[in-house]
Amino acid sequence: MISKTPSIGITKSTSAISIEDLAFREHSPKIMNSTVETPVAAEPAVVIPRSRLPAFLVIGLAMAWGLVLLLLTLFTANPVTLNRGQILESQWVIVGKVTGADKVVKSDPAHWPFQDRDEIRIDNLKDTGALIGEIYLIPLIPLIGKEGLVPGSYLVTPTRLPEFPPLIYPMSPDAEQQLQKIIEKP
């Protein structure tokens, strides 16, 4: 009695089969005059192996994150924020153009309280990181030496921030608006 299993194509028989014959039949279904049909699938247009998919996903997410950070950098500026305490402790707040390591000239007459001169000396200006040729809003106090006030010499008002250099601010409409708000609310 012989029965045929169509899915795997192996013939069963009641007679004895040797181990070698069985091993041969498992690997060679054509000898038994049976056909084994294998389904043929349509090939997809683009196949990405599963092992590369996570890598492409990570690279894509990293590129998207980098693009978001770039856009934030381009469209979001670091606004100038005036130190309220420093401004209130200052005797003068001037707007001047840096012309040397310790020299500032008048650039805005409305913010220049020194009527008798157009240039002043600021002893600690080099500590602020000011760039020559740039216009800054500068909070000042008078320089006091051993003998009292030193005429024509000033200091940038120190901040109360520990181990922090004195602050000066790039002149902009926003900085001027903040200055007006600080001065109005003492």
Image: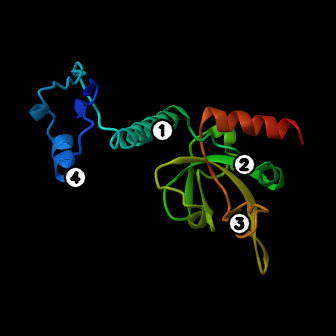
Residue behind mark 1: 65
> Which residue in the rendered view is the most extreme toward the top?
42
Tell me where residue 177 appears, x and y as whole percent: 71, 33
User: What residue did someone put label 2 on?
Assistant: 93
> Which marked residue is nearer to the observer: mark 4 or mark 2?
4
Q: Residue 79, how many percent across, how many down?
A: 62, 39
| Circles 1, 2 touching at the beta carbon (< 8 Å) | no
Q: Residue at x 78, y 54 (%)?
A: 86
Q: Nearer the viewer, mark 1 or mark 2?
A: 1
Which tag is nearer the camera, tag 3 or tag 1?
A: 1
Query: What is the x, y in percent for residue 11?
Result: 23, 32
For the residues bearing labels 4 and 2, Cβ distance under 8 angstroms: no
Q: Secondary structure at mark 3?
A: strand
Q: Earlier in the sequence, mark 1 or mark 2?
A: 1
Going by the numbered disc 4, the residue's amino acid type is Ile
Q: Secondary structure at mark 2?
A: strand
Q: Label 4 vs label 2: CA separation? A: 103 Å
Residue drawn at (39%, 36%), measured in percent from left and top?
Answer: 60
Give the SS element for disc 4.
helix
Q: Is residue 75 above or below residue 84?
A: above
Mark 1 closeness class: few <14, some 14–19, many ≥20 residues within 10 Å: few
Label whose residue precedes the other's in the sequence (3 or 4): 4
Picture quarter containing residue 10?
top left
Question: What is the quadrant of residue 52 in the picture?
Answer: top left
Query: Which residue is under mark 3?
Result: 151
